[in-house]
Image (tube, rainbow, N blue to C red):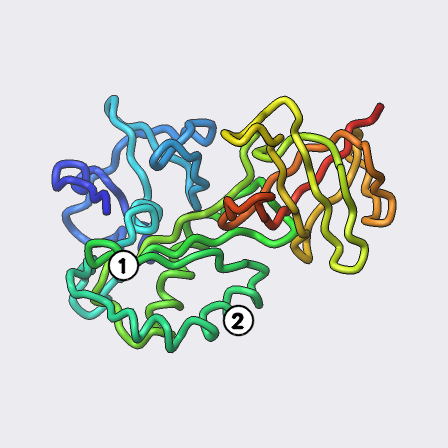
Amino acid sequence: MKKFVPGLLAGIIIATASAAYAEAGLQKVEAYLRPDLPITLDGKTVKLESSPMIYDGSTYLKLRDAAALTGLLVNWNEAAQTVELQNGGAKISSNVIQSKMSTIADFLHKKSLELISIDIVDSKLTMTIRKLNDHRSLLKASEVSGLINSIYQLLGQNNFDLIIDQFIIPESANIVGEISSIDAETKRVLITDKDKMNTNGDPDAVWVSFSPDAFIGIDSRERILFNDLKIGQKVKAWSVGPLFDSYPGQAKVIEFIVANE
């Protein structure tokens, strides 16, 4: 997990109760908010709860935003007047994850989120999730932080690294071709791309099923029904989860666009 180095942590601010500003040791400064400044994590744009702040040529983030991006837990200890950060190092058992899988999935679904996958690598737990009915926007940093804290509670421990990876569909579709077969009973369509051939000389082909929140439409973004699909239509689709490489392949799609010819 990426973590802020000490020098950077020293430049991150935390929002506390207004009464705290009357305490000794505080120094008034002139700074500027920069709401249009893009912030990315591993190449993906993230949403922050508060705008970045520019002071003396340096950029500062709210500590809770920074903690949410790095998987740290942050807490204000009123009694001790101390900002507390927690960073786990212990391993999380796969047995614990397995026993809580359905509980976590149900919890996320109530928040209009879908659990796509869970991976444990080098003592780090990564959960890949996506928004339901909204395939192109990310959760805010504060929302991610809230999810992390809730999942820690569901698992009954918080002494390990938990990373929330958000899936959004890219600009370009990963399945392109034309409809060559329709299975009305199982609500699947076979997409064939005759411009791509495999090593056996067969055209690239994928059976696609549709997630419950899948958008099916035409180029104008007009929504249509599964029953409106016809053999020969040129289409492009965005899949979520694994794409099984049998022949034909199999995939679940969350967006399916028919060319407006």
Q: Is residue 20 left or right of residue 233?
A: left
Q: Tell me how many marks there are.
A: 2
**Three-letter code, disc 2:** Asp
- Report x, y in % for residue 94: 29, 69
Distance in Å between CA atoms under marks 2 and 1: 23 Å
- Of 120 and 155, the residue lying toward us: 120
Residue lying at 35% horizontally and 65% vertically, measured from the top left: 149
- Report x, y in % for residue 228: 87, 44
Question: Given this view, does label 2 or label 1 mark the residue nearer the observer?
Answer: 2
Neighbor class of circle 2 (other Cα within 10 Å; few <14, some 14-19, many 20+) is some
In the image, is residue 231 above or below residue 251? above
The kind of secondary structure element at disc 1 is: strand
Residue indicated by mark 1: 73
Neighbor class of circle 1 (other Cα within 10 Å; few <14, some 14-19, many 20+) is some
Residue lying at 82% horizontally and 26% vertically, measured from the top left: 260
2 or 1: tag closer to the N-terminus: 1
Residue lying at 67% horizontally and 42% vertically, measured from the top left: 255
In the image, is residue 33 above or below residue 148? above
- Report x, y in % for residue 131: 56, 52
**Three-letter code, disc 1:** Leu
- Of 35 and 223, the residue lying toward us: 223
